[in-house]
Image (cartoon, helix red, strand yellow):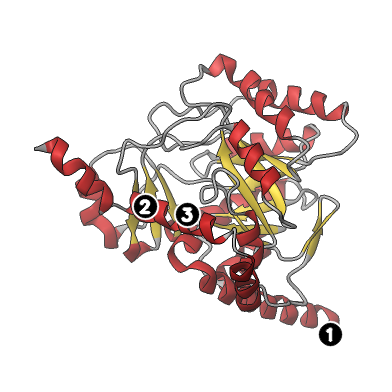
Amino acid sequence: MKSIFTPIRYLLSDDFALLLSRWRTAMLARMPLFLALRRKRYALQTDYLGAEVFGMKFPSRIGLGAGYDRNGEHLNVMEATGFGFMEIGTITPKPQRGGPSPALHKLPKNRALLYCGQTESQGVERVIENIKSNNHNIIVGCNIAKNDATAPEDAPQEYLRLFRPLYQYADYFTVNICRNSSERAYVPTSREEIMAILQPLFEFRRGQNQYRPILLKISPDLSDEQIDLMTDIMIDTPLDGMVACAGTTGRYGLEESTQIIHSLGRKAGALTGAPLRERALEVVRRVHERAKGTYPIIGCGGICTADDAMAMIEAGATLVQVTTEYIYGGGKSILNMRMGLNERLRKAQQRQTNQ
């Protein structure tokens, strides 16, 4: 009986709904008329959202975070949606399946997602094929990590195995050391472990004609001392910035979703969305203050509105990323956020001018 109902449960799951959304987006991405209409509806001109970071001109400070377009299939669609940049991934060297299904659980009362299982990826070769075949003008970051089955001692080789072939296709790299959605997750926290991953990337970059910024993505579950260590590594090495932060293994702020959480039991998994907002702000503020505001930070976690985006920028973020809110609200939500943030930045600049 279990085998009979398993496919039915999958068709009714949040996993399948997101898969359909991605498939539909990939199909529509091939239609020039769809892209033109989407651009006209969502990618409205703004005067205050742009920023120059890493020597690149970002048309908007709001980008799509990793987790939605895992394989680089939607680049032109995200550009037409009004995002100023986007991250592909998490990308792994070899293909790996997600799950076990259902792995994704929506918590709509909390505007949150819970993902339980290893990261789904089609592998680096497929991602490169997708980037090459996708005509786009959006700034692209590549979020990279080792395969879940790879032993921790082999992690440095895997990151380099991703970094080298992707180098000519990425505008920047995010070294993801905090994937925590599966029970086999590897989260390096010592300076030695992290430098073993980063140093080969720095050495490879030194031999290239083009410069690609390298950022480190950190977890909100780190202690204050560990966050300080990550920040010090950024200051002491050729790292270019930080992405703060990834999903959390915590289950705080989910009072409205207790029934769903109880039904899942003590399942390992990463929580993203609105409940992460306050902790993400704390992490960004701490990194910004310790680095004395001298390094770019991409703030992410719990950004659902223009007010959230503005709060993240005021905490020290240079750019912000949205993933969960896009899954819930689509292009309309991003448009509202862009227009709202543009107005808030206009008023902030006006106040500064009048002082």
Within 10 Å of the Cα at label 3, are there few (<14), some (14-19), or many (20+) other Cα atoms?
Answer: some
**Residue at the image position 50 percent from the left and 62 percent from the top:** 326
Foreground residue, 20 or 54? 20
> Circle 1 sits on which residue?
354
Disc 2 residue type (three-letter): Tyr
**Residue at the image position 20 percent from the left and 41 percent from the top:** 6
The residue sitting at the right extreme is 209
Q: Is residue 81 left or right of residue 170?
A: left
**Residue at the image position 32 percent from the left and 65 percent from the top:** 109
Within 10 Å of the Cα at label 2, are there few (<14), some (14-19), or many (20+) other Cα atoms?
Answer: few
Q: Disc 3 vs disc 1: Cβ atoms closer than 8 Å?
A: no
Alpha-carbon span between mark 2 and mark 1 = 41 Å
Select label 3 or label 1 by which is in front: 3
Q: Secondary structure at mark 1?
A: helix
Foreground residue, 285 or 37? 37
> Circle 2 sits on which residue?
252
**Residue at the image position 81 percent from the left and 78 percent from the top:** 352
- The earlier-in-sequence mark between 3 and 1 is 3
> Circle 3 sits on which residue?
22
Q: Is residue 52 left or right of residue 319?
A: right
Q: Is residue 138 above or below residue 148?
A: below
Q: Secondary structure at mark 2?
A: loop
